[in-house]
């Protein structure tokens, strides 16, 4: 079954952001600001991409959506970071309504729309467990009744870590949170044109069955300087330095390695 992922990398969509701007030019200036772009690349390099490189099931695709106005130096840097990943396809789009363009890209990526597929979103500052694709496939196989009776079914791995990364290393806390973007997948039946981008992730359970699994940490959600959902007043999440056991777990489960984090964030 084809597995398709979607990652927006500083794409200046019309809508789709909680941080509002009066014009698209203001949004582009905000997204491409030097300090913000440097942090996005640091997180992409140390968090978002390593876990994909080490997936136990490599049979997936990832569409990375960028703006057609992304400066060449950032465009080239992103291509360099993903050059060793045959699953990655970078797509450049002009500013358009966010859900419209993302739905189009996901449906266009389906090799045979008459066959079912799996879909997932992947934020550029989050990590998923290295067995996410494998477990997503297995969970769908384990639910033949739901698959038979529904056009769409969501699979939510709801245990993970909230983390802060920097030159000092990794600070984190384990938590259970339903319907985050990270490690949320969706089965889509053949001849169904719905996509995971048709739905707000936290409300997806209103529209389809959700299979929730909390047996193991399956994601790392980073809190950083430019989380779109945390630019307004929000309650802080207390985090602590990783224990030695957690450092090993982050490396094994998410391919997030503290020494590499320290190195990359110290180079700013």
Image: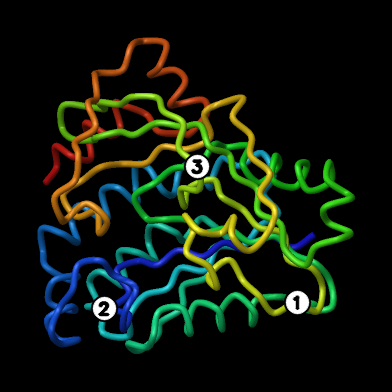
- Disc 3 element: loop
**Residue 65 location (% of width, % of height):** 42, 73
- Identify which residue, 128 or 195, lies in the foreground: 195
Q: How far apart are marks 3 and 2 (CA)?
A: 33 Å
Q: Earlier in the sequence, mark 3 or mark 2?
A: 2
Residue underneath mark 3: 178
- Residue at point 54%, 45% (across, down): 183
- Identify which residue, 247 or 123, lies in the foreground: 123
Q: Name the side, left or right, on which 222 lies relative to 157.
A: left
Q: Name the side, left or right, on which 158 lies relative to 226.
A: right
Disc 1 packing (10 Å; few <14; some 14–19; many ≥20): some
- Identify which residue, 145 or 226, lies in the foreground: 145
Q: Is 255 rendered above or below residue 118?
A: above
Residue placed furthest toward the top:
244
**Residue 147 location (% of width, % of height):** 83, 56
In this view, the mark in front (1 or 2):
1
Image mark for residue 32? none
Residue underneath mark 2: 70
Image mark for residue 192? 1
């Amino acid at each position: 079954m084809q597995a398709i992922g979607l990652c927006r990398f500083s794409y200046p969509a019309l809508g789709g952001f909680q941080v509002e701007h009066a014009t698209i030019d203001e949004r582009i200036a905000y997204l491409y600001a030097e300090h913000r772009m440097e942090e996005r690349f640091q997180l992409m390099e140390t968090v978002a991409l390593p876990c994909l490189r080490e997936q136990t099931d490599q049979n997936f695709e990832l569409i990375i959506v960028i703006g057609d106005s992304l400066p060449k130096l950032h465009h080239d840097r992103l291509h360099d970071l993903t050059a060793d990943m045959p699953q990655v396809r970078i797509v450049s789009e002009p500013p358009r309504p966010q859900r419209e363009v993302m739905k189009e890209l996901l449906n266009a990526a389906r090799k045979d729309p008459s066959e079912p597929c799996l879909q997932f979103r992947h934020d550029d500052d989050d990590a998923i467990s290295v067995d996410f694709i494998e477990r997503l496939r297995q969970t769908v196989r384990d639910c033949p009744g739901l698959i038979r009776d529904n056009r769409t079914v969501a699979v939510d791995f709801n245990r993970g870590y909230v983390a802060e990364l920097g030159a000092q290393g990794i600070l984190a806390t384990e938590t259970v949170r339903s319907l985050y973007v990270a490690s949320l997948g969706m089965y889509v039946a053949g001849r169904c044109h719905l996509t995971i981008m048709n739905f707000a992730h936290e409300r997806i359970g209103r529209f389809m069955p959700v299979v929730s699994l909390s047996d193991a940490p399956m994601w790392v959600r980073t809190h950083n300087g430019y989380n779109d959902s945390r630019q307004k007043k929000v309650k802080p999440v207390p985090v602590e330095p990783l224990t030695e056991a957690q450092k090993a777990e982050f490396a094994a489960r998410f391919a997030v390695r503290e020494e590499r984090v320290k190195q990359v964030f110290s180079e700013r």
